[in-house]
Image (cartoon, helix red, strand yellow):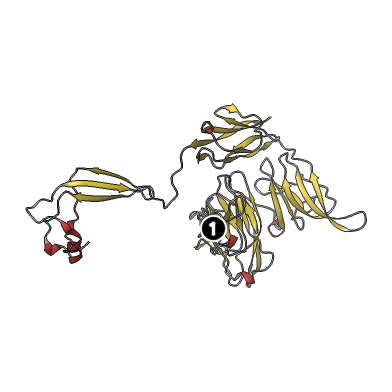
């Protein structure tokens, strides 16, 4: 199971479950509120289906979910349909769980669907700041053995054919990180062909080619990249032996990135917000650059004291909180920023709640053709009223005749209609 945190909401989880939070939704994708309950605003039809029953899914099959810079979700795993539509291994949703019909990497890759097994064993899913992502996965194909992929997927779902990692890395890479200049750190089971010194921890250029100048000294084996910190240093774990001779897993921190300075890049995934006075809003910014940029939030051009983290929390909003919020980042290579707007007002009533308003005019009434006046006779005028509801916005017209519509032809009116217009004697 995997989790991601979209901006301004709780969390999204993906995994092998059927009824998250006790709800009756057949789903492997669900939205959660901050208190851990199921988000009722998340698409209740959001679903990921495997080609085999859950009880037959092999242990260790991994599912991944990531939040893109614009707030959308990328999901990867062993599924073959998403929200009922064919999607092999990869799908993209908006922040509320509605499928992006234009995005289908599995189709572009020509991924096969093999009966009796998950679509893909996805080992990693790593985002870039530009919305593209890198992924490594494997699919056993009957009669052909296991086939491996290590690719970069563009924002339109096509594969970047300029990304050419070393041969052998596609079957071994287990963890991956993006450095400030766009180069990559990759860790796996053994070194790809042509690697020098560092063994199974290698650095790749942004096009996937091997950087032979990267020679880390690791006091252990089977390295795994755990994280890349804001200062460009990498956290890596390795298998090692303690001074007492016990096998242990050791955490290392490698010296930081030493390449050229990179100007800041600032992305605010959700650039427009609407809220009611007294509510709370959380603004999030994604910031990249080297050296690590200094940060500052502004409101309508005025710096907010103490607000120097990527997250700005605005609680119990007063009316004067409306306006433009700007995230400024700067370092030796330059200055950049991004903006988000916040407007405050009274929220619309919940869906399904009707607030009718009624207004009338003395315009001639509109009469159904079935009840049209006979030739040569004019309908009697009266007041025309209209009711509108806030839920649908559709208008219902009601004619309140000033006299009984006796001009209607009895042959054109059903017995029930006649009884409604001229109630039988003695009717209440």
Residue of label 1 = 108
Quarter residue 326 falls in: top right
Quarter residue 294 falls in: top right
Nearest to the observer: residue 62 or residue 402: 402
Assign the N terminus to one quadrant of the image. Answer: bottom right
User: Farthest residue toward the top?
Assistant: 302
User: Is 420 positioned to the left or the right of 230 in the image?
Assistant: left
Q: Position of residue 322 (x, y in %)?
A: 51, 33
Q: Is residue 85 above or below residue 355?
A: below
Q: Position of residue 229 (x, y in %)?
A: 72, 43
Q: Report the label total.
A: 1
Nearest to the observer: residue 135 or residue 380: 380
Q: Secondary structure at mark 1?
A: helix
Nearest to the observer: residue 6 or residue 110: 6
User: Farthest residue toward the left?
Assistant: 376
Q: Position of residue 78 (x, y in %)?
A: 61, 63
Q: Is residue 142 above or below residue 19?
A: below
Q: Position of residue 199 (x, y in %)?
A: 79, 53
User: Is 28 positioned to the left or the right of 421 in the image?
Assistant: right
Q: Is residue 150 visible?
A: no
Q: Is residue 379 visible?
A: yes
Callout 1 crowding tier (Cα within 10 Å): few <14, some 14–19, many ≥20: few
Q: Is residue 425 above or below residue 3?
A: below
Assign the C terminus to one quadrant of the image. Answer: bottom left
């Amino acid at each position: 199971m995997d989790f991601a945190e979209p901006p301004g909401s709780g969390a999204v989880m993906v995994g092998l479950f059927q009824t998250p939070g006790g709800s009756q939704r057949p789903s492997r994708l669900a939205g959660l509120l901050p208190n851990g309950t199921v988000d009722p605003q998340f698409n209740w039809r959001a679903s990921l289906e495997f080609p085999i029953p859950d009880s037959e899914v092999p242990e260790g099959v991994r599912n991944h979910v990531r939040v893109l810079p614009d707030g959308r979700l990328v999901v990867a795993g062993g599924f073959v349909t998403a929200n009922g539509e064919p999607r092999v291994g990869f799908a993209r949703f908006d922040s509320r769980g509605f499928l992006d019909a234009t995005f289908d990497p599995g189709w572009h890759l020509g991924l096969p669907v093999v009966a009796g097994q998950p679509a893909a064993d996805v080992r990693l899913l790593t985002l870039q700041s530009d919305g593209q992502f890198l992924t490594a996965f494997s699919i056993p194909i009957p009669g052909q053995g296991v086939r491996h992929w290590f690719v970069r997927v563009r924002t339109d779902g096509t594969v970047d054919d300029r990304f050419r990692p070393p041969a052998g890395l596609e079957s071994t890479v287990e963890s991956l990180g993006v450095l400030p200049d766009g180069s990559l750190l990759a860790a796996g089971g053994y070194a790809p062909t042509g690697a020098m010194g560092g063994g199974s921890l290698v650095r790749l250029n942004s096009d996937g080619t091997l950087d032979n100048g990267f020679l880390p000294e690791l006091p252990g084996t089977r390295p795994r990249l755990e994280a890349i910190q804001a200062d460009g240093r990498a956290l890596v774990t390795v298998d090692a032996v303690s001074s007492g001779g016990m096998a242990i897993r050791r955490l290392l921190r490698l010296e930081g990135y030493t390449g050229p300075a990179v100007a800041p890049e600032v992305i605010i995934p959700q650039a427009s917000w609407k809220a009611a006075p007294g509510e709370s809003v959380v603004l999030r910014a994604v910031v990249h650059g080297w050296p690590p940029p200094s940060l500052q939030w502004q409101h309508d051009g005025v710096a907010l004291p103490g607000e120097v983290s990527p997250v700005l929390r605005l609680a119990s909003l007063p009316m004067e909180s409306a306006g433009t919020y700007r995230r400024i980042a700067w370092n030796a290579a330059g200055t950049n920023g991004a903006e988000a707007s916040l407007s405050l007002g009274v929220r619309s009533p919940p869906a399904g709640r009707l607030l009718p308003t009624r207004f009338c005019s003395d315009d001639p009434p509109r009469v159904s053709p079935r009840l049209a006046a006979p030739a040569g006779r004019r309908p009697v005028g009266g007041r025309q009223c209209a009711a509108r509801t806030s839920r649908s916005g559709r208008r219902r017209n009601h004619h309140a005749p000033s006299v009984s519509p006796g001009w209607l032809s009895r042959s054109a009116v059903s017995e029930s209609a006649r009884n409604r217009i001229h109630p039988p004697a003695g009717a209440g």
